[in-house]
Amino acid sequence: MNGSATAPRRGLRDWAVDIGLFLLAAASGVWMAAMRLEEPSPVPPWLFNLDQLTGALGCAALWLRRRRPVELALVLVALSAFSELVAGAMLVALFTVAVHRPPRTTTAVFALSLLAVLGYVVLRPEPGTPDHLLLLLGVVIQGAAVGWGLFIHHRRRLVLSLRDRAARAEVEAHLRAEQAQLHARARIAREIHDVLGHRLSLLSVHAGALEYHPDAPAEDVARAAKVIRESAHQALQDLREVIGVLRAPVGELPQPTLADIRQLADESGRAGMWVDLSEELTGAVPDRAGRTAYRIVQEALTNARKHAPGAEVRVRVAGAPGRGVTVEVCNDAPAPAASDAISASPPAVPAPGATSTPPPAPPAPAVPAPGAVPTLGARPGQGLVGLAERVALADGRLEHGPAAAGGWRLSAWLPWPP
């Protein structure tokens, strides 16, 4: 592009460079003119005068080199075919084209300048100087000017490329930081859902039972109130831990382990659920798989408490190194409401590997909402969606859906390296 558009305003450095190049071209013309005056020259006086005028005009035209560098270079190259005093201005014009224009344009202008050198040697031969030496001198001088200009051109392009790369790197770093923040927010939201959802569901069961049976015996009311108080206290403790991690400069969210599943089953049992826990594990489960298994059981118990009140829930955790960890949670269809959950004795959680037998009269939990679907997660919500994401991050598999005999089944497999 030859750039006929208005050039940007020159700064102090630009003015200094322009003045320096102008003085250099003028000094070159004055020096060659002085040499011609000191020695007898075969050039006629009229041609010498025309040569001086051409050199002066060429130097003056250098002030246009930033606006129209290619056009100026072509004119000065053509004049240099017969005028030797315009050579300094022509070299500056070649240098300018090499700096400010693409290499292809520079190559074309440089080729024309070589033809001008050949024309000068033919039109104005120097007595006592071989033509080939004069031609070689012109090619070397013009090649040096163009080579220096190309060096500056590529150096500027390299600097611009590095600046652009640094700007892109800064933008990419900013985007990565935003993505990390979004990921951290999603992780914190998932943790809060997992931690508080289980506790609040316990509160909902017992509070609903109290509301439905305000005439319950004082002992049962006191027991339910105790469970509500303990669950609320534990929920606040969990929330404080999460918020404490957010305030700390460095830290991890409090993470449960697979060993906490029994405590989870005990809490659900005290809330009136019927939980049959079976653990068949060989060796120590990896932390990542253990945390994920805990969250699976926690979400399954929470959904069973909300969607299948009064149903027995069977939890099975099995695995070994090399075979992976299998977590399976099944619940039956909810039992018909016969009495309130607060009037029932909490069932005991069986020992590892044992199978619990529910008592003859299982307690009924709080009255389910009218029209509630009696299955665990009949319509997948955010809990199951987040659970699927968590299992996928652990390179595992998650399946859930209605069971053949009624109720709901949730199954997951997690890797356990050998």
Image: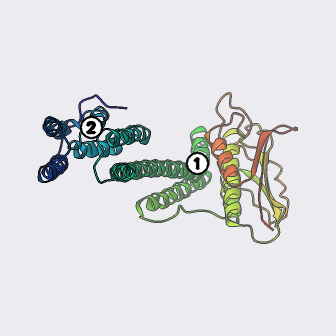
- Residue 221 point in image, percent of width and height: 58, 50
* Residue 167 position (above or below residue 373): below
Spatial CA span between label 2 and label 1: 93 Å
Q: Amino acid at mark 1?
A: Gly
Between 197 and 288, which is closer to the camera in this rendering?
Answer: 288
Q: Amino acid at mark 2?
A: Phe
Q: Left or right: where does residue 408 sit relative to residue 291?
A: right
Is residue 163 something that shows in the picture?
no
In front: label 2 or label 1: 2
Q: Position of residue 234 (x, y in %)?
A: 54, 59
Answer whether residue 69 is visible to the viewer in this image: yes
Q: Mark 2 = which residue?
A: 82
Residue 136 is situated, as x and y percent measured from the top left of the image, at: 38, 52
Give the residue at the far right of this rendering: 405
Q: Which element carries disc 2, helix, strand or loop?
A: loop
Label 1: which residue?
197
Q: Residue at x 52, y 63 (%)?
A: 252
On the picture, is 353 further left or further right than 291? right
